[in-house]
Image (cartoon, rainbow, N blue to C red):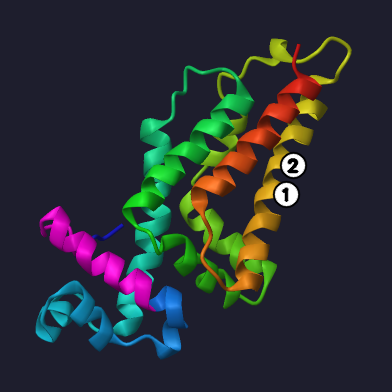
């Protein structure tokens, strides 16, 4: 990631990012106003366009910032010594929640981004650009298959767990996009945790 805001103090950088995320999350890219962003961030127009050539470059930066930082935080903050796959997935949710608390409009912004993507191929291409093997590592590296109940096929069990959690997350995200409204991330995390606990009850010893 070429972070054009890297030299700024964190407080000023986050004011710009949050102002832009909030504007695009509310009205989308086409209707998004750099004047509103400048006003909310408390900076001059010349200052904003010192960092970005135009609105499109700012928008692309936000997408890059979001994916790059979430993947980096998972790589750096996840306890890779925890061999329980389900607990690892729970921890990833908590890592994302902390990140989202620093950027309150980020989830809404990403909903708008995905809403404007018209094909599965584009979504896959976007994910693969930033994922760089992290998903495979999450589901396979240093996992303890001995936690699974006797008599269950270990590979099929973990595939079922993975597909179930991914489908659950996908449906929540799609519902959020259709509603075009804010989502209480803590309530969503609570529901995910209940689902995770149920999976452990079904599949673990």
**Residue range highlighted in magenta:** 5-23
**Residue contact at pointers 2 and 1, CB within 8 angstroms:** yes
**Which residue shows up at 19% across the image and 73% down it?**
41
**Which residue shows up at 38% across the image and 59% down it?**
104
Residue 57, horizontal then vertical, whole percent = 31, 77
Q: In the rendered image of this protein, does residue 48 appear above or below residue 199?
A: below
Disc 2/disc 1 C-alpha distance (Å): 6 Å
* Residue ID for mark 2: 163
Residue 96, horizontal then vertical, whole percent = 45, 45
Mark 1: few/some/many CA within 10 Å (<14, 14-19, 20+)? few
Q: Which residue is at the front of the view, 87 or 191?
A: 191
Q: In the rendered image of this protein, does residue 200 appear above or below residue 44?
A: above
Q: Quadrant of the N terminus?
A: bottom left
Mark 1 residue element: helix
Q: Is residue 49 left or right of residue 98?
A: left
Mark 2 residue element: helix
**Which residue shows up at 49% across the image and 46% down it?**
132
Disc sitting over residue 167 in the figure: 1
Disc sitting over residue 114 in the figure: none
Examine the structure image and report whether residue 127 is included in the region drawn in magenta.
Answer: no
Q: In the rendered image of this protein, does residue 21 appear above or below residue 140?
A: below
């Amino acid at each position: 990631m070429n972070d054009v805001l890297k030299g700024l103090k964190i407080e000023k950088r986050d004011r710009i990012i949050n102002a832009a995320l909030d504007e695009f999350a509310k009205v989308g890219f086409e209707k998004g106003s750099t004047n509103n962003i400048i006003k909310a961030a408390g900076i001059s127009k010349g200052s904003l366009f010192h960092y970005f050539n135009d609105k499109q470059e700012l928008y692309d930066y936000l997408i890059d910032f979001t994916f790059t930082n979430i993947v980096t935080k998972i790589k750096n903050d996840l306890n890779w010594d925890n061999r329980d796959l389900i607990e690892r997935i729970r921890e990833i949710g908590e890592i994302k929640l902390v990140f989202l608390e620093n950027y309150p409009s980020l989830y809404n912004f990403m909903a708008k981004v995905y809403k404007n993507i018209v094909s599965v191929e584009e979504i896959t291409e976007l994910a693969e650009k930033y994922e760089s093997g992290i998903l495979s590592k999450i589901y396979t590296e240093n996992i303890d298959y001995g936690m699974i109940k006797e008599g269950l096929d270990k590979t099929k069990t973990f595939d079922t767990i993975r597909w179930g959690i991914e489908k659950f997350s996908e449906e929540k995200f799609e519902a959020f996009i259709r509603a075009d409204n804010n989502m209480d991330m803590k309530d969503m995390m609570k529901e995910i945790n209940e689902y995770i606990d149920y999976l452990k009850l079904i599949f673990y010893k």
